[in-house]
Image (cartoon, rainbow, N blue to C red):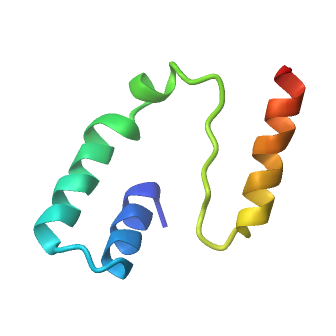
Amino acid sequence: MNNAETIKRRLEARGSVREEIEKRVKQAEDIELTEAYRQHADFVIWNHDGIDFSDTLRRVQEIISAVR
């Protein structure tokens, strides 16, 4: 599952209306998921489906500790 599909699925699970889901997914595809947008970030953390959030949180804490 790619990131746009994940966004769509999560918004559907929250009960968002179809028009809002389509708008949000398009925004993500046009802006936030592009390399041009992400190149400005020092780190990118994806909380992928199937990954325990505590693992994502641990990775964030490792990055913060490393740059301090």
Classify residue 30 as left or right of residue 17: right
Q: Quadrant of residue 51?
A: bottom right
- In this rendering, the answer to whether 1 lies above or below 56 is below
Residue 52, compared with residue 56, is above or below; it is below
Answer left or right for 24 relative to 36. left
Indicate whether 12 appears above or below 57: below
The correct choice, above or below, for 36 with respect to 23 in the image is above
Res 15 → quadrant? bottom left
Image position of 16 (left or right of 49): left
Q: Position of residue 52 (x, y in %)?
A: 73, 70
Instruction: Judge by depth and name the residue closer to the eye, 68 or 59.
Output: 68
> In the displayed image of the protein, which residue is found farthest to the front?
68
Q: State left or right for residue 29 relative to residue 22.
A: right
Q: Quadrant of residue 41?
A: top right
Q: Residue at x 39, y 34 (%)?
A: 34
Task: Quadrant for the C terminus, please.
Answer: top right
Q: How many marks?
A: 0
Between 21 and 65, the one lying in front of the other is 65
What residue sits 66% from the left and 30% below the top? 43
The residue sitting at 80% across, 60% down in the picture is 55
Q: Residue at x 34, y 70 (%)?
A: 11
User: Which residue is most to the left?
Assistant: 19
x then y, percent, for residue 67: 83, 21
The x, y position of residue 40, in whole percent, is 51, 19
- Whole-percent x, y for residue 6 in the image: 44, 65
Looking at the picture, tell me which residue is in the foreground, 61 or 47: 61
